[in-house]
Image: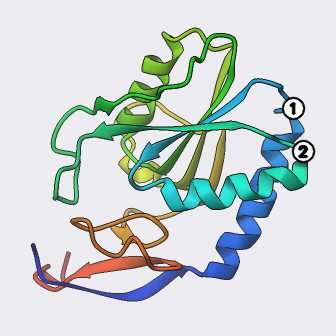
Amino acid sequence: MRPYHIDDVLITPRQLERRLDSLAREMAAGAHSDNLVVIGILRGSFIFMADLVRWFWLNDLHPRIDFMIMASYGSGTTAAREPTVSRDCSIDLTGADVVVVDDILDTGRTLIKAVAHLAAKGPRSIRTCALLDKPARRAVPCEADFRGFEIENVFVVGYGLDYDGRHRELPHIAKVTFTDEDPAR
């Protein structure tokens, strides 16, 4: 693991709370369904998704919840390969209104692959929600239907996001600075 430090808080716990409240209201405006399924892409989305669906009850949304695992990063800081489904969701999606929740939309490959995979299961609709959007990293055309925050092209941890399995527990989102980087870059 490269030497690093975490000093810069980019998004505070209070900012996260406010945005989750408004995101839940945005999603509820067009999501009243008796067959709503929310599927989180593990591992990074678990804290965000848990907090988001807690706001749903205030908006009279009562989803079934499941998860899937998409693998592409390994222990690095950039995607090493095309994403693959390493654990599928277990809920029957036939006729369901699905919301796919991910931690960060960067290259777009993971979200596109997840949506295509889930679309083959016969849902009525699929919408997407990403906590963070990093458009500078987009490798394929992809936009989330709902997004929490747009961020610059920096590596971040906290609130479920990690560096080599660490720092998911932070209550905020912070920038990782690698100490072996050339300061001129």
Q: How many marks?
A: 2
- Classify 31 as above or below 16: above
Residue 170 falls left or right of residue 107: right
Which residue is at a point 17% across and 37% down the rendered structure image? Answer: 81
Q: Which mark is residue 32?
A: 1
The quarter holding residue 180 reads bottom left
Task: Tell me how far mark 2 sits from mark 1, CA to CA.
Answer: 8 Å
Which residue is at a point 38% across and 69% down the rendered structure image? Answer: 156
Pointer 2 local density, CA inside 10 Å: few below 14, some 14–19, many at least 20 = few
- Classify 29 as above or below 184: above
Q: Quadrant of the C terminus?
A: bottom left
Give the amino acid type for the residue marked by disc 2 in the picture. Asp
Residue 1, given in percent of the width and then of the height, sits at 9, 72
Which residue is at a point 48% across and 10% down the rendered structure image? Answer: 120
Give the amino acid type for the residue marked by disc 1 in the picture. His
The quarter holding residue 50 reads bottom right
Residue 135, given in percent of the width and then of the height, sits at 47, 49
Pointer 1 local density, CA inside 10 Å: few below 14, some 14–19, many at least 20 = some
Residue 99, given in percent of the width and then of the height, sits at 64, 34
Give the camera-side residue of 145 and 20.
Answer: 20
* Residue assigned mark 2: 60
> Counting residues from the N terminus, which is met first, the one under dot 2 or under dot 1?
1
Which residue is at a point 13% across and 83% down the rendered structure image? Answer: 3
Cβ–Cβ under 8 Å for marks 2 and 1: yes
